[in-house]
Image (cartoon, grey):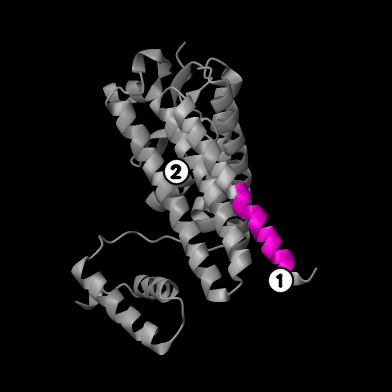
Amino acid sequence: MNKRLDLPLIAWLTIIWMLLWSGVTWGNLISGVVVAVILCLVFPLPPVAMELRLRPLGILRLAGYLVYDMVASSVEVTRLALRGKRRPAAVVRVPLRCRTDLMIAATAVAVSSVPGGALVEVNAGTATLYLHLSGADDPAVVARARRDVWQLEALAVRAFGTREEIERVQAAPVDGKAPQP
Amino acid sequence: MNWTAAADLAGAVLLLLGAATCLTGVIGMLRLRDVLTRSSAATNPQTFGMMLLLAGLALRLRTGVDAGTLVLVAFFQLLTSAVAAHLVARVAYRTGAADASALLYDELGEDTEH
């Protein structure tokens, strides 16, 4: 019984509960803890290797880049919407350097805000992302999309990763197979 | 002009900007032709518009607890819209709605065949 009680998760749920009830009061705190404990007992989560570190500077840099990326992405979509021309697309493989599930997930979430690319598949076993890119007839577009993913990966790992993972993303990315014509 | 009036004005501008950004997302959804670009039109500008709306709201509400709740909303919006976009793209690809014949090349297809 005791093993299932994940204390950081209970703390996090209690904070959410108090924010939803708009106030830090003893009543909210106690009812929040009760609800969180019941939730954890009724819906136990599978154990996840929580190799998570919170690095404030890295998180700030990641957030800054994401905001910039979101603005760029919105502008791009608006431009496409007003022009309405279709460009040839392709599904491109991007092998990642990080290995833990959590870092792959963080990178995948970050990549979803990349302009012009849709995340089609994530293979956690091989740590590979597959992106649907429009304008793939231009090799420069594909190369830039790959570089963007690797940069987001490095930013995400520097924000949340263990030291071991950070060392891994400092290495040069291993390129996938050459795209077929 | 004092600080509260300035914050109210900045909040109002952000609310308008956010609404306009959400509108461009909707126009994109109507104008674009295929599932994947439509899905990115539905998620990216919408999320960004939502962030602007939340920032505008925070400037108008100006209380710590409300700001905390708004940060929470922004956090879950970022996480869920990314997951939703990925699921739509994945289903579109797997059911062929993404128009596989129009692809120049398909490295996922290569990797899953072998």
Q: Position of residue A118 (x, y in %)?
A: 45, 33
Identify which residue is drawn at 46% across, 41% down.
B43
Residue B9 is inside the magenta segment: yes
The one of B18 and A55 positioned closer to us in this rendering:
B18
Query: Pointer 1 and pointer 2: residues touching (CB < 8 Å)?
Result: no
Region of the chain picked out in magenta, as a range = B4-17
User: Pointer 2 indicates a residue of which chain?
Assistant: A
Residue B106 is inside the magenta segment: no
Q: Is residue A37 above or below residue B50?
A: below
Identify which residue is drawn at 27% across, 74% down.
A5
**Closer mark to the observer between disc 1 and disc 2:** 1
Q: Main secondary structure of the magenta part?
A: helix
Q: Which residue is mark 2?
A: A108
Q: Secondary structure at mark 2?
A: helix
The one of B92 and B25 positioned closer to us in this rendering:
B25
Identify which residue is drawn at 57% across, 42% down.
B21
Dot 1 surroundings within 10 Å: few (below 14), some, or many (20 or more)?
few
Relative horizontal placement of residue A122, taking residue A35 as reference (left or right): right
Q: Which residue is mark 1?
A: B4
| Quadrant holding the C terminus of chain B | top left
Would residue A57 be visible to someone looking at this image?
Answer: yes
Q: Is residue B82 above or below residue A59?
A: above
User: Pointer 1 indicates a residue of which chain?
Assistant: B
Q: The disc labelled 2 sits on which kind of residue?
A: Ala
